[in-house]
Image (cartoon, coloured by chain):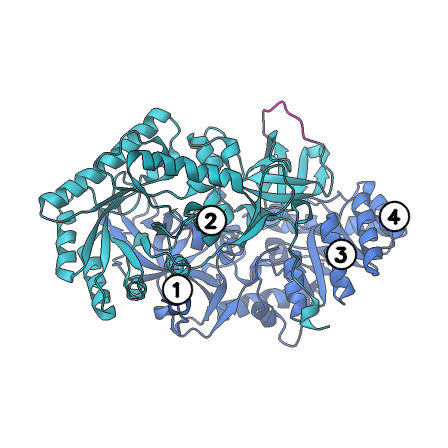
Chain colours: A blue, B cyan
Amino acid sequence: MRETEIQQGETAATVGALATPALLLDKERLDRNLARLSSRMAARGVVLRPHMKTAKSIEVARRVYRSGPGPITVSTLAEAEYFARHGFRDMTYAVGLAPHTAERAMRLRKAGVDIKVLLDSPEQAMMLGAAGRAAGVTPSAFIEIDCDGHRGGLTATDPKLIAVAAALDTAGAKLAGILTHAGESYSLSEPQVLVATAENERAVAVAAADSLRAAGHQCPVVSVGSTPTAHFAEDLTGITEMRAGVYMFFDLVMHGVGVCRIDDIAISVLATVIGTKPEKGWILVDAGWMALSRDRGTAAQRVDQRYGLVCDLSGSIYPDLIVAEASQEHGILAIRSGSAHVLPDLSIGAKVRILPNHACATASQHDLYNVVTAGNDAIEAQWLRMRGW
Amino acid sequence: MRETEIQQGETAATVGALATPALLLDKERLDRNLARLSSRMAARGVVLRPHMKTAKSIEVARRVYRSGPGPITVSTLAEAEYFARHGFRDMTYAVGLAPHTAERAMRLRKAGVDIKVLLDSPEQAMMLGAAGRAAGVTPSAFIEIDCDGHRGGLTATDPKLIAVAAALDTAGAKLAGILTHAGESYSLSEPQVLVATAENERAVAVAAADSLRAAGHQCPVVSVGSTPTAHFAEDLTGITEMRAGVYMFFDLVMHGVGVCRIDDIAISVLATVIGTKPEKGWILVDAGWMALSRDRGTAAQRVDQRYGLVCDLSGSIYPDLIVAEASQEHGILAIRSGSAHVLPDLSIGAKVRILPNHACATASQHDLYNVVTAGNDAIEAQWLRMRGW
């Protein structure tokens, strides 16, 4: 037997013929989600710089930017290089800088990509300056601001803020502006608290920019963002730029936060029933954590969706049917505890669609999106994802 | 700028020069773990059929089988096809059968691969028979036995057991034997309970095989397995075959169960410090859940390792330093709550190694293993992983 005689899978033309588990992307929902935030930001005169960490796909980026590349945010330098190969030139790498990433980002800058980096210490400013000189380019950097104690960055009143800006000057690097992220917003669910959190993100960002300006530094860009605050912010005075990523697909966590409806969720995992245990109230499917991810982001929310919420092939929810347990390639479907609903009659070979807790994590378990439109069995396209660092 | 001018990453020759995050595999620990279980099974006259779902790499399989392909277990048909392309012929696909997987497995059988499938219903036996006839091959199937209520399968005393064997006969398929998996063993930690659980797995498997034989069916293979029971079983009378996968690498969950020492864990994620927040007791690294996985398998154990335990480059543990929080590309290192240890002095650019909760999940976030030997900075090889279904 020659190696070529054994093929891996086959490209299917219909959802019904897909090998499972497989990732589906509803193009109409995607487009609706994209339009919603784009219009919201356009109405406020704020540049939307979508975060590509969720989709990681040039085809999705082309749905965002129909007439040519626009500004993006990336989470890895492999992502930056991938989008640069596809013509994107204006990008922010929104993860704190280290010596090897400074060098790699400056090689990209040398190749004509306007990549901005992120830092919060004079030490990083110096290493960026050195990498810029080595590559023969002028670096451009955001100073990271901490608006909610969630991760990295300096508070708006930290005297180090001015020291970092001064270090950038000394190092021969340009201050692009300040950047902050309301990471805490993912754990919220009360609309008025979300509005207040968005306002806090805005106010801290503007205060930091004002401090820098008062100290004589240009601070052209004031960048904020998270999917919840992007959708709940009422006032964006002083903000020039919004970043968000998961809004493209949405997910059960975002539904729990209150940012989207269930029928806005654009991705789902197609799975096949491989066993039934009616005596236990279980249906076994071939989607385990390898296809769904181990993300349990709804565990801390009012409604715990365990490993996902189950729909039929048309996308209609089976009431209270969730993926109760997941091992590597097995999922156990069961009715949510306390519910009066009964297990649907699904026999071996039946197909279901599972809505994910966290779109970034679930999509990353797959190599491509099978692009579909609700009510249509055809796979319109297969859009590849990139991965790695 | 031409596309070729922007390269993704570069192949590094040393650990110090690797772009991070990156997956490291300690070859000596791998070999030691492989030898430990191989000798244990050889001493008991039981065939070891390693589960390739953890490693998913032909190079790792070649460390198991130095003189040519041997029996393996796989978790997806893409895995089966991958190992078949590399010369493996004797394999068990240990996930319940559906119509499309029956057809795909029988195509592989037609190509000369002795693939055995898994089922627990007469309905599946019939669909397997049909797929076999369509491909012009005689299928071979295991009946799945449920030894601990953990997932699929029939109990040893379920009358359906004989009905499934009869359905295989009728369908023109061969009964390979019975297969069970002590999934419950992963949640244990008391040696005497582990020994009892292994004995239960054995006893149930043998009882099921005896039932089948008493009803006049051949039941040549009696297959059991999980990494904990494989290492704790004292008696394997009546068992012909053992399956285990995570034993190759081990992980913090297996350490918590009591199957391995910390210094048996063969994989780790190399990460770089990208920020410090001494006032909060935090060190930020560039390994988040994308590099570590969202697996929190130690959460239910006596020692919760959060997203992983942190070592220096040589593999020595920083006492009580764990990855306390993880977002997509950020990890927050902190000293375990209640510990008297202090945060090590790690500045931006410093490298650490993170031991994973769950090797199957963490390895699946990476495309390749950087193969190293303790105390040596050289990367000896890069072994690719396969993925997908």
The secondary element bearing badge 2 is classed as helix
The local crowd at label 1, few if under 14, some if 14 to 19, many if 20 or more residues have their Cα within 10 Å, is some
Residue A315's tag is 1
Residue A222's tag is 3
Amino acid type of the residue tagged 3 in the rendering: Val
Amino acid type of the residue tagged 1 in the rendering: Gly
Q: Chain of mark 2?
A: B
In the picture, the quarter occupied by the C terminus of chain B is: bottom left
Which residue has dot 4 on it?
A166
Amino acid type of the residue tagged 2 in the rendering: Val
The answer to whether residue A203 is seen in the rendering is no
Labels 4 and 1: the sequence-earlier one: 4
Foreground: disc 3 or disc 4: 4
Choose between A250 and A288: the one closer to the eye: A288
Residue A125 in the figure: left or right of residue A312: right
Labels 2 and 4 in the same subunit: no
Q: Chain of mark 1?
A: A
Q: Position of residue A210 (x, y in %)?
A: 83, 51
- Marks 2 and 4, how far apart at CA: 51 Å
**Residue segment shown in magenta:** B336-344
Question: Residue, x 87% and y 54% (percent of image)?
Answer: A172
- Marks 3 and 2, how far apart at CA: 49 Å
- Mark 3 in CB contact with mark 4 (< 8 angstroms): no
Residue placed farthest to the left in the image? Answer: B215
Residue A302's tag is none
Q: Position of residue A351 (x, y in %)?
A: 33, 62
